[in-house]
Image (cartoon, grey):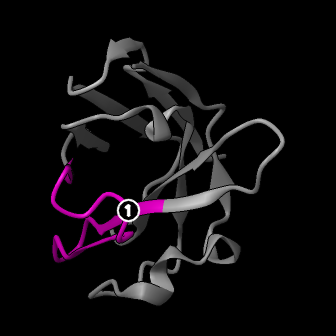
Amino acid sequence: EVRLVESGGDLVQAGGSLRLSCEASGFSWPDYVIGWFRQVPGKERTAVSCISVSDGSTFYADSVKGRFTISSDKALKTVYLEMNGLNPEDTAVYYCAMDIQGYYPVDAESLDAERYDSWGQGTRVIVSS
């Protein structure tokens, strides 16, 4: 059974940075896509970014493009989300998820949450103004 564990969420001041991690376990297939999503209580979940661990292709939501960087360490089965220039609108619970189909290169369709099969429990990010 796939298990995803997020970490790195914290309280940070506007303009600050955080690095989130998503550690995956419980599987053996080599090709998959990891996506990061976020959700504010009472609001819909939105896509942030995704990466194919097969070819390293990445895609970002417009709201985070140029500020966030997604990367992966395939050997460690860990995906990172480096977040810079944080603002209060980035406050949310951040979830990582796995798309086991793993089509690459990723594109805008790869941010469709319906593609993802397994989800983590989330890590909270709070950005104070």
Q: Judge whether residue 95 is colored magenta.
A: no
Q: Residue at x 31, y 57 (%)?
A: 64
Where is mark 1, residue-wise? 63
- In depth, the one of 87 and 19 nearer the eye is 87
Question: How far across and how far down the image is residue 2, in percent?
Answer: 60, 47
- In depth, the one of 62 and 36 nearer the eye is 62
Question: How far across and how far down the image is residue 46, in percent?
Answer: 60, 60
Q: Residue at x 42, y 13 (%)?
A: 10
In the image, residue 103 above or below residue 22:
below
Question: How far across and how far down the image is residue 11, in percent?
Answer: 42, 11
- Residue 56 relative to residue 105: left or right: left
Which stretch did the figure color magenta? 48-73
Q: Judge whether residue 68 is colored magenta.
A: yes
Q: Residues within 10 Å of mark 1 (few under 14, many from 20)?
A: few
- Residue with the most extreme top position: 11
- Residue 49 relative to residue 100: left or right: left
Q: Quadrant of residue 82?
A: top left
Q: Quadrant of residue 50?
A: bottom left
Q: Residue at x 63, y 77 (%)?
A: 115
Q: Residue at x 42, y 86 (%)?
A: 108
Q: Quadrant of residue 117?
A: bottom right
Q: Label 1 amino acid?
A: Ser
Q: Which of the image's four quarters has the C terminus?
A: top left
